[in-house]
Amino acid sequence: MVAIPKPLTERGRKTRAALVDAAETLFGVKGYDGTSIVDLTREAKIALGTFYIYFPDKKSLFVELVDSLGVRLREHVALRVGKEAHRIEMERLAFLAFLEFVAKHRHLYRIVRQADFVDQDCFRRYYRRMAGPYAEGLREAAARGEVRAGDPEVMAYCLMGVADFIGMRFGLWEKKPSAKVIAEALAFTTGGLLPDRKRK
């Protein structure tokens, strides 16, 4: 793939964003293989030739979409967690923020899972960029005695897995998880994080 520099003008940024938004809709509904560049430009309301000013091919746009969703998800979680000091409360806020993001970006699951077949490096990067800082936060929390000691990377992927499947089952399939579902999931995850002396 040929690297194309990102636009510097406001108009250029808006056009590029329109293509990424169109990709989120169409790759989510029609799938990667079922979506053409013509479909994407029509959805974004731009001329076909304009596409190639911003992306060399469909795959490049798909990769940018997945990377962008990852960035937006992490930023959304960070905003909701804010400066909360205790790790257990951070987990609660982060879990709720993830469910909010799923509700807003309902094609997230389908898009990310397609990445495993379209561009495996992109697929792995999506998870690794979340897991790395997550593991570091757990390592620091363990040093403060807020969570149990253990392999922080393993713990991060375990927690991400719980959020992923709860989000799919109750956030995506049923539109919105009930308070009981959220409480049960949080009890399970935070209970597993507590230091031994705090376990019941």
Image (spheres, rainbow, N blue to C red):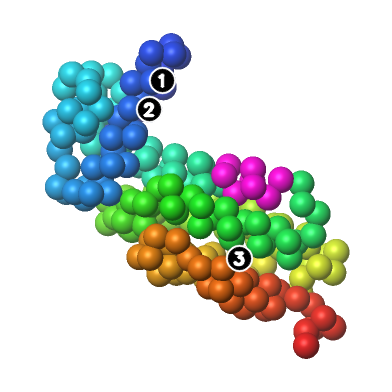
Query: To which quarter of the image does residue 17 belong?
Result: top left
Residue that lies at the very extreme toward the front in this rendered image: 179
- Closer mark to the observer between disc 2 and disc 3: 2
Q: Quadrant of the N terminus?
A: top left
**Residue numbers of the magenta segment:** 75-82
- Main secondary structure found in the magenta portion: helix
Characterize the local packing of mark 2: few (<14), some (14-19) or many (20 or more) Cα atoms within 10 angstroms. some
Residue on which disc 3 sits: 156
Residue on which disc 2 sits: 17
What's the CA distance linking mark 2 and mark 3? Answer: 31 Å
Which residue is at a point 53% across and 73% down the rendered structure image? 181
Q: Three-letter amino acid code at disc 3?
A: Ala
Q: Is residue 35 among what the camera can see? A: yes
Residue on which disc 1 sits: 13
Which residue is at a point 56% across and 73% down the rendered structure image? 180
Q: Nearer the viewer, residue 97 or 48?
A: 97
Rendering coords of residue 76 (x, y %): 57, 44
Q: Is residue 178 left or right of residue 115?
A: right
Q: Secondary structure at mark 2?
A: helix
Rendering coords of residue 154 (x, y %): 60, 71
Q: Nearer the viewer, residue 18 or 64?
A: 18
Q: Secondary structure at mark 3?
A: helix
Q: Three-letter amino acid code at disc 2?
A: Ala
